[in-house]
Amino acid sequence: MELNKIEYKKFIWPIIIGLIIWFCSPFKPASVSMAAWHILAIFVATIIGCITQPLPIAGVALIGLTITVLLGVVPLDTAVEGFGNGTVWMIAMAYFMSRGFINTGLGHRVALIFVRLFGKRTLGLAYSLIGVDLVTSPATPSNTARAGGIVYPIIQSLAETFGSNAKDDSRSKIGSFLVFAEFHGDIITSAMFMTAMAPNLVAVTLAKSLHVQISWFSWFLAAIVPGLICLIVVPYLIYKMYPPEVKDTPNAKEWADGQLEKMGKMSRPEKIMAVVFVLALILWMLSSFIGLEAATVAFLAVSILLVCGVLSVNDILHETGAWNTLVWFSILIFMANELNTLGFIPWLSGAIGGALHGVSWGIVLLILVVFYFYSHYLFASGTAHVSAMYGALLGVAISAGAPATLSALLLGFTGSIFASTTHFANGPASVLFGSGYVPQSDWWKYNFILGLFYLVVFGGIGTLWMKVIGIW
């Protein structure tokens, strides 16, 4: 065999910055322990490694964990406790459920049905594709899988049907609009459900370490009004700002009918998958009322799919996205929790909170959300960004007197909407921009405008809505 290619140059910045922080310990605040300072150095180096990616994120995280144990910062038994985190396993189970959507063809069928029902005009076609993302998002924690694995193949087929090619000017016929609309639909649905993308669950776990509890239903209830407003308005805004040349798509219905006819009647595996998905959704919504943890619901759903034969053990063993996430998520959560346990986050929150003494908590929270949003220009991973900043920013908001749950949810939503920045902002951006349908200049320009809209809707209307429903 040949050795795997490793980009060793990309280790340089993580190592340099980690060493600088490590050896600056003589200058650390007196109230911060040496262990807290050292875990900070390793954590920052790991996050930078997740950005530069000399190895995939799971490999970088594993090296960070190994260094933490080898240097005696934390014993091995403590370091591996993160692998027993219920939220981590909930993500893995949800990945397995999403594999059921793909294996059975249910996701593809749902997409075709939406196209058939709402695809007579190009704008309706965009809404129908976003509807597919909305329907599948509660049980698909990989927004890349939704956008790239379920919806994009439909977009590509439709674009080809209407003679819209990513390699020439015909991209503007319909392909550019549909790709860009789906990207933003995916951003919005990712913000609406706690289980719609992995960084949301990172945020929930970090909030819990600061004694802020967020249930699946409370996240959904808080996000539903700003989310629905965005789902209704954003595709129309894109239609006006970035209009397709083809306005009417009567052939889309015929194409969808033809594809559905090829698929035949709904199979038994699809029916079982649909029933289990609805069951999981209902139990997630009721979990906080019936005392059933969301992770337990996910385990139950996957167990039923295994017993019914929709999923096989091989499906689970070969679902690399789930195991990859399990590794890096467990390690990053462990490091972030240690920063809190060893006292660094409480010190940082207190120090910044003291500096902001006398400033209205509303202004502090606004500044934190805006800073969190625009700092994503420096990140190529939502996971890395949330892991690096969410806990610290939430701690600052709470120390400034902001309502804890309001702050946790607003920062949680921001962890999704900040993807409306660059063409490398997250996995869906890489997939959809990489299709070639939307030029980089258009991507950045229209994303900047829509980013402002998201801040107003989620930050302004969302805050008012959460006041109405009694969250703060």
Image (cartoon, rainbow, N blue to C red):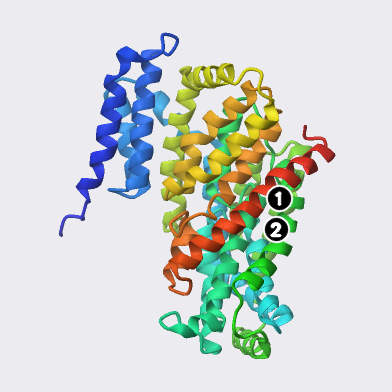
Quadrant of the image containing the N terminus = bottom left
Q: Is 261 located above or below residue 348 in the figure?
A: below
Q: Residue furthest top?
A: 30
To which quarter of the image does residue 181 belong? Answer: bottom right
Viewer-closest of 165 and 5: 165
Which amino acid type is shown beneath numbered disc 1?
A: Val
Give 71 or 326, whichever is nearer the viewer.
71
Per the image, the residue denoted by label 2 is: 230
Q: Is residue 119 left or right of residue 182?
A: right
Q: Residues within 10 Å of mark 1 (few under 14, many from 20)?
A: some
Residue 288 makes an appearance in the image: yes
User: What's the residue at 56%, 89% (across, down)?
Assistant: 162
Is 268 in front, or is 232?
A: 232
Looking at the picture, how far across and down is residue 93, in whole percent?
Answer: 55, 50
- The residue type indicated by label 2 comes to Cys
**Residue 102 image offset from top left, x and y in percent:** 54, 68
Q: Is residue 52 above or below residue 156?
A: above
Q: Position of residue 119 (x, y in %)?
A: 69, 81
| Residue 85 drawn at (x, y percent) | 52, 35
Q: Residue furthest right?
A: 468
Q: CA distance from mark 2 to mark 1?
A: 7 Å
Q: Is residue 160 above or below residue 18?
A: below
Residue 310 is at least partly visible in this image: no
* Circle 2 crowding by C-alpha within 10 Å: few under 14, some 14–19, many from 20: many
The mark that comes first in sequence, 2 or 1, is 2
Residue positioned 27% across, 39% down in the render: 13
Element at label 2: helix
Residues at discs 2 and 1 in contact (Cβ within 8 Å): yes
As helix, strand or loop, the secondary structure at mark 1 comes to helix
Mark seen at residue 457: 1
Is residue 29 shown left or right of residue 238? Answer: left
